[in-house]
Image: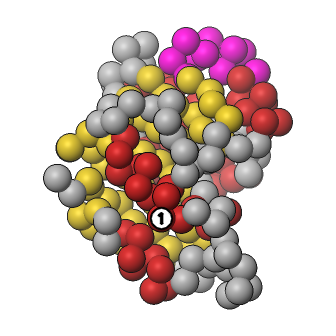
Amino acid sequence: MDNPVRRLLWPPEKKISKFVVNGNTVADIGSGPGYYTIAIAKAVGEKGKVYAIDSDAAALERLKEKAIKLALNDRIIIEKASASDLHMIPDNSVDFVLSSGVICCMAEHKAAVKEMSRIMKQSALAYVEVSRQPILNDPRSVSEKEWRELISEFQILKEGSGIFNRWAFVKRIT
């Protein structure tokens, strides 16, 4: 997930640059080894903060090493957790949520969306993306119908789909 070819073809800065600014608090749900987290940490600056949440301890350890090497560890809060339990992030405290390819890797889809909504400030935005999975009886799969239900929890600003994924930019409904 975090390799030079991917960075060249799909630079993480491009995806976040319209939504993340200096001083923001951002939640990178499913951060892995930090593909987006590092770019977000640079964008939020010294006054901002990034919650990097993932259930993979090894990936989080790689992220921690990168953050220390780049002197960004003071603004990245690394937590091993599920997207369905973000208790370490206060209610209404996040300016932007990034959830790229996470919901489709877990079974508790609705709980994850509920937690994302809970942590978002009233004016917060989120980018939510799921992979299309060919195994329909897999509890991690997100069907078209379920996708519609999940994003209906938000005000949809823009959405789309491709061969391999579905995505939406959303705003918290007040």
Query: Regarding mark 1 in the picture, which secondary structure is present there?
Result: helix
Q: Residue at x 76, y 42 (%)?
A: 56
Looking at the rendering, the stretch of residues picked out in magenta corresponds to 65-76
Is residue 67 something that shows in the picture? yes
Give the residue displayed 56% in from the left and 23% down from the top.
Answer: 77
Residue 18 visible somewhere in the drawing: no
Of 34 and 122, which appears nearest the observer? 122
The image shows residue 172, relative to residue 64, as above or below, that is below
User: Is residue 152 shown left or right of residue 174?
Assistant: right
Expressed as whole percent of the image width and height from the top left, the position of residue 168 reads 39, 66
Residue at 72% across, 15% down = 69
Amino acid type for the residue under numbered disc 1: Lys
Is residue 66 within the magenta segment? yes
Q: Which residue is mark 1?
A: 110
Q: Quadrant of residue 79?
A: top right
Q: How is the image coloured?
A: secondary structure
Residue 70 sits inside the magenta stretch: yes
In the rendered structure, the answer to whether residue 96 lies left or right of residue 9 reads left
